[in-house]
């Protein structure tokens, strides 16, 4: 968690979509996309994001830049990216970026 983690949503997600690879990973790990989306939406950027990216995300809540979270699912990583214009949020594997 970080200084901005909240119990309520901190920004607009826009249309939420997921890549086939991300959905397959979550299904195989018996995890739901909504769990990770909710964490991202509340400012919990995950344990797999460096401090610089966390600080950029914290500022992006207010200045409107892109937001990215990174979580470990099993032995792999999943990213969640909300576009700067808040039109969409995508769950994807790093290899799909």
Image: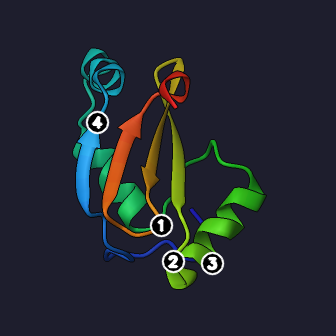
Cβ atoms at labels 1 and 4 below 8 Å apart: no
Cβ atoms at labels 3 and 4 below 8 Å apart: no
Q: Label 2 to label 1, Cα distance in Å? A: 6 Å
Q: Which residue is mark 4?
A: 18
Q: Residue at x 69, y 58 (%)?
A: 53
Q: Earlier in the sequence, mark 3 or mark 2?
A: 3
Disc 2 secondary structure class: loop
Image height of 62 relative to 14, above or below:
below
Q: Earlier in the sequence, mark 3 or mark 1?
A: 3
Q: Residue at x 55, y 70 (%)?
A: 65
Quadrant for the N terminus, please: bottom right
Instruction: Give the image location of residue 67, x and y in percent.
Output: 52, 61
The reply to whether residue 49 is visible in this rendering is: yes
Snapshot quadrant of residue 13: bottom left
Most distant residue in the right direction: 52
Q: Residue at x 65, y 48 (%)?
A: 49
Cβ atoms at labels 3 and 2 below 8 Å apart: no
Assess disc 4: are there few (<14), some (14-19) or many (≥20) residues with their C-alpha within 10 Å of its C-alpha: some
The reply to whether residue 45 is visible in this rendering is: no
Q: Which residue is mark 2?
A: 64
Instruction: Give the image location of residue 93, x and y in percent.
Output: 47, 27
Q: Label 3 to label 1, Cα distance in Å? A: 12 Å
Q: Earlier in the sequence, mark 1 or mark 4?
A: 4
Q: Earlier in the sequence, mark 2 or mark 1?
A: 2
Q: Which residue is mark 3?
A: 59
Instruction: Give the image location of residue 63, x and y in percent.
Output: 57, 83
Q: Which residue is mark 1?
A: 84
Cβ atoms at labels 2 and 1 below 8 Å apart: yes
């Amino acid at each position: 968690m970080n200084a901005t983690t909240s119990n309520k949503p901190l920004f607009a997600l826009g249309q939420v979509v997921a890549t086939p690879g991300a959905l397959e990973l979550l299904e195989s790990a018996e995890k739901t996309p909504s769990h990770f989306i909710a964490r991202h939406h509340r400012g919990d950027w995950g344990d797999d994001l460096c401090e610089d990216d966390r600080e950029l995300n914290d500022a992006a809540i207010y200045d409107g830049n892109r937001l990215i979270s990174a979580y470990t699912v099993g032995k792999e990583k999943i990213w969640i990216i909300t576009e700067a214009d808040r039109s969409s949020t995508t769950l994807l594997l790093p290899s799909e970026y």
